[in-house]
Image: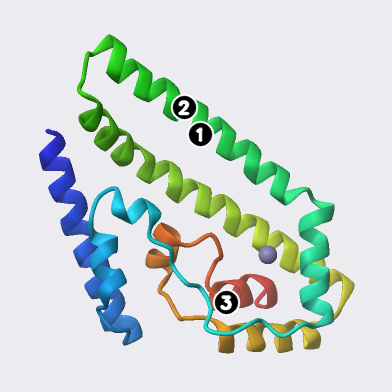
């Protein structure tokens, strides 16, 4: 069962990478291979932008929104809850089911995938909330300019790929949610 699920995971990630390369024209590189490997893909970093995002009033208000709405604290709370779930899950596999530790860790890796995806979705909502706050403090013109700057710095990813791997929503989605109302 464990091996079957791990095989499914690898196949699903291969499909995701191939789809990503076809849709964004990116290269199937070294990091793409690392992302296919269970456990390794939990720690491979994914660069989100190619350049520093230029400062603007919109960006400053966006950051102010994160502070005013306690986004970092909330993210850490969610992480702590998930961490406690992980400890409980691991302990029950090791103690109650007497599973060898390497198997328990692989199970935990699999079980964490939906939780991580949910966490990304949660972060995306925070980013959009901060965008709305920044828009309310500035205007549509500044928001548009900031989104254009952001999209020039961003490494383009599809929605599905970003949801699996990124804590920031793609700029295209942010622009759509913010300005197409
Ligand atoms: Zn943000």
Taking the image in four quarters, ligand 1 sits in the one at: bottom right
Residue at image x 32%, y 84%? 26
CA distance separating discs 2 and 3: 32 Å
State the SS at label 3: helix
Please provide percent x and percent y for residue 166: 48, 62
Q: Is mark 3 within 8 Å of ligand 1?
A: no
State the SS at label 1: helix
State the SS at label 2: helix
Residue bearing the label numbered 1: 82
Residue at image x 43%, y 68%? 159
Quarter of image, res 32: bottom left
**Residue 171, numbered circle:** 3
Q: Is mark 1 within 8 Å of ligand 1?
A: no
Q: Nearer the viewer, residue 108 or 44?
A: 44
- How packed mark 3 is, by other alpha carbons closer than 10 Å (few <14, some 14-19, many 20 or more), is many
Q: Are marks 1 and 2 in contact (CB under 8 Å)?
A: yes
Residue at image x 37%, y 51%? 42
Please provide percent x and percent y for residue 83: 50, 32
Residue bearing the label numbered 2: 85
């Amino acid at each position: 069962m464990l091996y079957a699920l791990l095989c499914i995971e690898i196949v699903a990630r291969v499909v995701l990478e191939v789809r990503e390369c076809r849709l964004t024209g990116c290269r199937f590189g070294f990091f793409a291979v690392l992302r296919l490997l269970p456990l390794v893909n939990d720690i491979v970093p994914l660069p989100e932008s190619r350049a520093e995002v230029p400062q603007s009033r919109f960006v400053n208000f966006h950051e102010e929104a994160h502070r005013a709405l306690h986004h970092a604290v909330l993210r850490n709370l969610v992480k702590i809850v998930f961490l406690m779930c992980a400890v409980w899950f691991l302990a029950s596999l090791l103690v109650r089911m007497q599973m060898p530790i390497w198997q328990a860790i692989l199970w935990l890796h699999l079980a964490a995938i939906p939780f991580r995806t949910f966490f990304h979705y949660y972060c995306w909502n925070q980013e959009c909330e901060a965008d709305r706050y920044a828009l309310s403090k500035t205007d549509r013109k500044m928001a548009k300019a900031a989104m254009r700057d952001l999209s020039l710095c961003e490494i383009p990813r599809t929605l599905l790929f970003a949801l699996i791997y990124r804590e920031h929503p793609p700029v295209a989605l942010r622009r759509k949610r913010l300005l197409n109302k």
